[in-house]
Amino acid sequence: MANIVLNMGAANTVIMTISERVTITSPFFLFHFQSKFNNTEERFFQATNISNNKIRYDEFEITETSSPNYNGGEVDLFTGEWTYDVYQASASTLSISGTTGGIIETDMAIVIDENYD
């Protein structure tokens, strides 16, 4: 079972527990997705943890769109299975080499199209 399910063309609320593994102060989060179908890679930056109780859980809004703002929690994915890594970073960057602290979450995501019959 996937940890994240994203609907194409929609804003998706994602709940996870990653703050407990953070080792830097006031981190930014870089999400890195890789398709299990053809190894396509997508990265986007998500700075805003909208959780009302960050000690218990983290909440993010991830928008799947064909014209993403990669620095604003938006990403362009196609339907199917993806693996993802979440990196903690000391600055907002789309570069994995520019991150500090490394990977704090690795799991699987499914992207679905609810409009597909």
Image (spheres, rainbow, N blue to C red):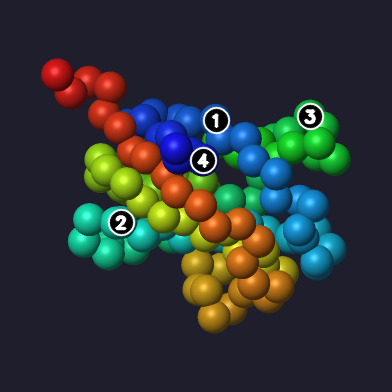
Task: Specify the label residue 13 is tagged with.
Answer: 1
Give me the residue at 51% from left, 40% from top.
Answer: 3
Give me the residue at 70% from left, 73% from top.
Answer: 101
Q: Is residue 1 visible?
A: yes
Q: Amino acid at mark 2?
A: Ser
Counting residues from the start of the chain, the first of labels 3 and 2 encountered is 2
Q: Amino acid at mark 4?
A: Asn
Relative side of 9 to 104, left or right: left
Relative to 40, residue 114 above or below: above
Relative side of 38 to 86, left or right: left
Give x and y (percent) for residue 89.
67, 67
Relative to 35, residue 76 above or below: above
Near mark 3 (Cα within 10 A), the count class, few <14, some 14-19 or many ≥20, is few
Q: Is residue 67 visible?
A: no
Relative side of 19 to 38, left or right: right
What is the secondary structure assignment of the residue under circle 1?
strand
- Distance in Å between CA atoms under marks 4 and 2: 15 Å
Count of numbered labels shown in the rendering: 4
- Pointer 2: what residue? 35
Task: Specify the label residue 29 is tagged with.
Answer: none
Rendered-image quadrant of the N terminus: top left
- Distance in Å between CA atoms under marks 3 and 1: 13 Å
- Pointer 4: what residue? 3
- Pointer 3: what residue? 52
Near mark 2 (Cα within 10 A), the count class, few <14, some 14-19 or many ≥20, is many
- Distance in Å between CA atoms under marks 1 and 4: 12 Å
Give x and y (percent) for residue 87.
60, 64
Q: Amino acid at mark 3?
A: Asn
